[in-house]
Amino acid sequence: MTDTTTSPRRPGPTAQRIAEMLRVDHAGEYGAVNIYRGQRAVFDKLPGKERTAALLKEMEEGEYKHQAAFDDLLLSRGVRPTLLAPIWNAAGFALGAGTALMGEKAAMACTSAVEAVIEGHYKEQADELGEDEADLKAMILEFREDELEHHDTAIEEGAEEAPAYGLMKRVIGAGCAVAIKISEKI
């Protein structure tokens, strides 16, 4: 007689799917670092914006920590990075500098929009990972918490007060979603 009180163990994602996860997460963290670098390229040079520049530098350092972790995972698991990294890096810097030129609240609106998408993306990945990838799942959940913190900081700093916040959030969020889908495969 078969025991029906326990459900069968659900298999985790395939090696190919994990490679896609790592590739896109690596690309996203590279992009995030460059968004903050673009914002700091503006705020580091403006008098009276030292506090904002320091806040952005702190968030950039968190993203750099994430990027380094994914660098290590790509290497250790033999996963190639996205071929579009140079494009995402340039686009991230341009997005960061462009929103910073619009002002502090616009820069924070950019951060809010990006981090909202990434937080949701990490949650989906964590939900998909099985027991065989417990360490990766724990890392992704830790990074998700960092992204939530960056999002909340941006909101506290006035992101929602930026001109055309709703539009910015939708456009930037859609751009992030497209970059995620493309970076998984290419």
Image: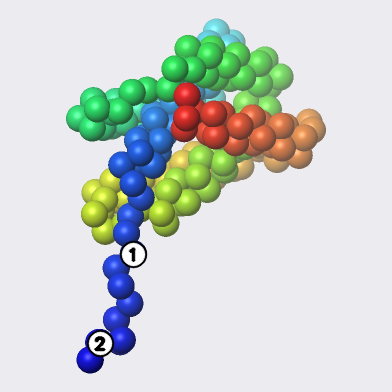
**Circle 1 residue:** 10
The kind of residue tagged 2 is Asp
The residue at the point 29 percent across, 68 percent down is 9
Give the structural element (helix, strand or loop) at label 1: loop
138 relative position to 56: left or right: left
Residues at marks 1 and 2 touching, judged by CB atoms closer than 8 Å: no
Looking at the image, is 34 positioned above or below residue 164? above
Q: Quadrant of the N terminus?
A: bottom left
Q: Give coordinates of residue 56: x percent, y percent.
A: 49, 26
The furthest residue to the bottom: 1
- Which numbered disc flags the more N-terminal residue, 1 or 2? 2
Residue toward you, 123 or 186: 186
Q: Give coordinates of residue 135: x percent, y percent.
A: 24, 49
164 relative position to 132: left or right: right
**Circle 2 residue:** 3
Report the number of discs.
Answer: 2
The residue at the point 20 percent across, 30 percent down is 76
Q: Give coordinates of residue 81: x percent, y percent.
A: 37, 23
Looking at the image, is 150 positioned above or below residue 12? above
The kind of residue tagged 1 is Arg
The residue at the point 61 percent across, 32 percent down is 178
Compute the Cα span from label 1 to label 2: 17 Å
How crowded pointer 1 is (Cα within 10 Å; few <14, some 14-19, many 20+) is rated as few
Give the structural element (helix, strand or loop) at label 2: loop
Q: Give coordinates of residue 141: x percent, y percent.
A: 37, 50
Q: Which mark is residue 143?
A: none
How crowded pointer 2 is (Cα within 10 Å; few <14, some 14-19, many 20+) is rated as few
Q: Is residue 141 visible?
A: yes
